[in-house]
Image (tube, rainbow, N blue to C red):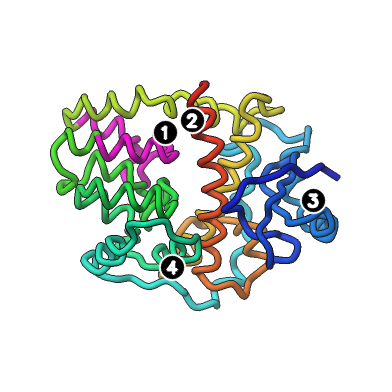
Amino acid sequence: MADIEPEPTFAPKCEGCYAKDGTLQCTQCHAGYYCSKECQIMDRGLHKQECQHWKDSKWKPGLLVRPNQWSGINTGWLLREPVHGTCVPLTELMALARAERKPVPAARTAELLTARGPYGENVLHAAVASGDVVLLLGLLTACHVPPDLGDFRSNPPLYYVATHPDAGDEDQRCKIAALLLAAGADPHRRSGTTDTTAADAARSSGMHQLSAVITTHPGFKLFRRVRDQLNAVPVAEDVRKLVHKFSDCHWLQNSCLWFQCPNRAMLMQGLKVHPIHEQTPEQTQAQRWEDAVRRHASFQRLFAKMCEVF
């Protein structure tokens, strides 16, 4: 059984009791969170399946992600559950976002993320689309909204920076992009509609300054290293912990988004829901997002630390 190491405050919920904060994490996969050694032992049978992905030396490289945790048809039994999220007008979405200008608990941020625009836009998309730098800063730093959450077309906020007509002039877009990148946005993530990155979209639109802001940020090289290691066997030690957290966060966020999409039977077909969601099918959408927000905060702390030295 793997050891556990301390995790700072604002930690995910314990996967053993689901009552206390998981201030300890599995040192093997960095995706298992527990409040005590006893809870880790209690959850060992379930967590072993997830943790094994990272220990299996027989896993072959070359898959889209390593391990290919996200694929596998196991979502059919969930299709009968009603969707907890709501679609609201963007004006109402902006009003929700503007109300949060001070540090808020993860549960409140989760409530914000259950509201989506007609195309699946969340509060972060709405802030980017309006070009509101102050609002965006509050959402990223006070609410800890994960910066890579896609809409129902899998377009992240950073892609909106390069393509949305109302995001402001190029200087404004550069400020917004810098905030998203500092919060841990993945500059290599591609649009679900055009299969291009934000930097590519900016360059094709003649916004070379914006493209340079994205490609010269320390996170650009760091995320390239992380993505290279997703298919590596074994994962390089210098980024092992970050790779594990990156994979876990995105898997959990995709799982949350799948639950929330009104036409989810057609969204991300073949998605295997995150083990946490399999173990707690009675959770509301807000509860699912709360754990995703907490896990991203853990990833964000490590990302910021590594950006300083990478």
The residue positioned 21% from the left and 30% from the top of the image is: 204
Q: Which residue type carries mark 1?
A: His
Image position of 159 with respect to 10: above or below: above
Q: Which residue type carries mark 4?
A: Glu
Residue 6: image x %, image y %? Answer: 71, 44
* Label 1 or label 3, whichever comes before in sequence order: 3
The count of marks equals 4
Instruction: Report the Cα–Cα distance between label 1 and label 3.
Output: 31 Å
Identify the mark at residue 48; answer none if there is no mark: 3
Instruction: Report the Cα–Cα distance between label 4 and label 3.
Output: 31 Å
Q: Disc 4, disc 2: CB below 8 Å? A: no
Identify the mark at residue 223; answer none if there is no mark: 2
**Residue 103 appears in which quarter of the rendering?**
bottom left
Q: Callout 3: few (<14), some (14-19), or many (20+) C-alpha neighbours within 10 Å?
A: few
Secondary structure state at the residue bearing disc 1:
loop
Judge whether residue 200 is colored magenta.
Answer: yes
Q: Which residue type carries mark 2?
A: Phe
* Label 2 or label 3, whichever comes before in sequence order: 3
Secondary structure state at the residue bearing disc 3:
helix
**Residue 213 appears in which quarter of the rendering?**
top left
